[in-house]
């Protein structure tokens, strides 16, 4: 291992450990923070490269933000970088979730940690908006891309799945932006088949699964999971609670709450569930099962992304998918903003504390160009204080 590679690995570990610790707010926030660290601050990637990775990540199974971390690690540090970036990004959430799972099984309830997170979500919204502005300027290169952008927003608001919204946006871009302009007479055949065949034949309760059963269940989820963390919740409800009976409805709700309260990807919910079902061995196999597929998928997909760029058709498809990914992030951000702001507080119809934090975070990020990490941490301190007023 060369000295240069060692320095790169140390840098990757430093960045993704920090992102793993402060990464509250879900995939959109994680990707926004990565864009700020990787593209804007450190310039490890061009913004166009980052967008290509984001577009590809949205079209393959696995958690988006975790796979983005693994992609960046692979490009900057090879296979060793892939492992370092992915593990460092996941590690803080897994450790925190395991500690909370131990407390939960000992005392039967969750600690009151909500006040500590009071100011984080409004600040995360500002970080996402900042990244959307930069990514949007790069992705929407010409006026014609606005049509794709608006189409995908409408499809999402109508309730279409994120994956199908991306595919339709990509297909529209490939056919509309290339075929119409070139007046070509043939259209290449694009086949994208997503299979998700979950057996529902039996409703027999199996309250004590083996480690193999638990591990294989989460390995399957990690291999076929598309979309946001809410898709993961649907899988868990349908199988762990309703089909197998390995988990109660209340335990699932508590696991989801832990996933929201801890930084990093929602995949750490699997660690909590594994511990509740089979203790520490269960936490280990559940975590490995849901996380490992992402490493192998990225290892297989990353080398072909530049080749896709060299083809006129696939380049147009990637451009359209990049625009579509930004559009989906806009919808997610608007939804988060609505949930945060439209909460009656102190007799007012809106959450005035959240509005105040958004204004302060906006000044810090846009006017004074503070690092997103400091903005999030500072807002959490302000929010903690406001929660006691």
Image (cartoon, rainbow, N blue to C red):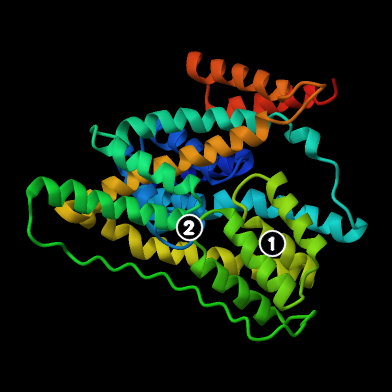
Q: Residues within 10 Å of mark 1 (few under 14, many from 20)?
A: many
Above or below, 277 against 179 in this view is: below
- On the rendered structure, is 313 left or right of 48? left
- Identify the residue shown where x is 74% and y is 51%: 258
Along the viewing direction, whichever of 264 and 1 lies nearer the viewer: 264
Along the viewing direction, whichever of 120 and 281 lies nearer the viewer: 120
Above or below, 117 against 201 in this view is: above
The quadrant in which residue 250 appears is bottom right
Q: Residues within 10 Å of mark 2 (few under 14, many from 20)?
A: some
Above or below, 183 against 42 in this view is: below
Task: Give the percent coordinates (x, y) of residue 207.
Answer: 80, 79
Q: Name the quadrant of the N terminus.
A: bottom left
Task: Give the percent coordinates (x, y) of residue 129.
Answer: 49, 29
- Identify the residue shown where x is 28% and y is 55%: 171
From the image, tell me which residue sits under label 1: 271
- On the rendered structure, is 319 left or right of 83? left
Q: Is residue 46 visible?
A: no
The quadrant in which residue 242 appears is bottom right
Along the viewing direction, whichever of 178 and 157 lies nearer the viewer: 157
Along the viewing direction, whichever of 280 and 241 lies nearer the viewer: 241
Q: Nearer the viewer, mark 1 or mark 2?
A: 1
From the image, tell me which residue sits under label 2: 83
Element class at badge 1 = helix
Q: Give the mark, 1 or 2, whose residue is nearer the N terminus.
A: 2
Q: Name the quadrant of the C terminus.
A: top right
Q: Count every numbered label the image shows and give the total.
A: 2
């Amino acid at each position: 291992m060369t000295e240069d590679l060692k320095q790169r690995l140390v840098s990757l570990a430093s960045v993704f450990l920090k992102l793993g610790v402060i990464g509250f707010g879900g995939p959109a926030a994680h990707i926004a923070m990565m864009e700020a660290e990787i593209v804007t601050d450190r310039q490890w990637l061009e913004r166009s490269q980052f967008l290509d990775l984001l577009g590809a990540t949205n079209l393959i199974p696995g958690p988006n933000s975790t796979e983005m971390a693994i992609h960046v690690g692979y490009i900057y540090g090879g296979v060793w970088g892939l492992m370092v970036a992915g593990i460092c990004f996941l590690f803080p959430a897994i450790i925190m979730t395991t500690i909370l799972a131990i407390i939960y099984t000992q005392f039967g309830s969750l600690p009151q940690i909500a006040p500590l997170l009071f100011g984080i979500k409004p600040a995360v919204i500002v970080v996402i908006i900042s990244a959307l502005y930069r990514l949007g300027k790069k992705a929407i290169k010409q006026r014609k891309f606005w049509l794709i952008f608006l189409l995908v927003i409408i499809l999402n608001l109508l309730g279409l799945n994120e994956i199908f919204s991306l595919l339709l946006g990509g297909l529209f871009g490939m056919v509309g932006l290339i075929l119409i302009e070139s007046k070509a007479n043939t259209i290449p055949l694009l086949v994208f088949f997503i299979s998700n065949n979950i057996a529902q034949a039996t409703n027999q309760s199996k309250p004590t699964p083996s480690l193999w059963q638990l591990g294989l269940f989460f390995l399957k989820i990690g291999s076929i999971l598309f979309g946001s963390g809410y898709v993961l919740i649907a899988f868990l409800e349908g199988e762990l609670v309703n089909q197998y009976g390995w988990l109660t409805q209340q335990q699932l709700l508590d696991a989801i709450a832990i996933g929201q309260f801890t930084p990093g990807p929602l995949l750490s919910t699997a660690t909590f569930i594994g511990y509740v079902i089979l203790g520490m061995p269960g936490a280990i196999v559940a975590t490995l099962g849901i996380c490992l597929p992402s490493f192998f998928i990225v290892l297989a997909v990353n080398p072909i992304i530049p080749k896709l760029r060299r083809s006129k058709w696939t380049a147009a498809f990637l451009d359209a998918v990049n625009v579509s990914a930004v559009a989906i992030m806009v919808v997610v951000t608007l939804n988060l903003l609505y949930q945060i702001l439209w909460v009656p507080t102190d007799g007012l119809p809106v959450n005035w504390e959240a509005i105040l934090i958004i204004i302060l975070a906006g000044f810090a990020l846009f006017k004074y160009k503070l690092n997103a990490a400091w903005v999030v941490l500072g807002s959490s301190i302000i929010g903690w204080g406001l929660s006691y007023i």
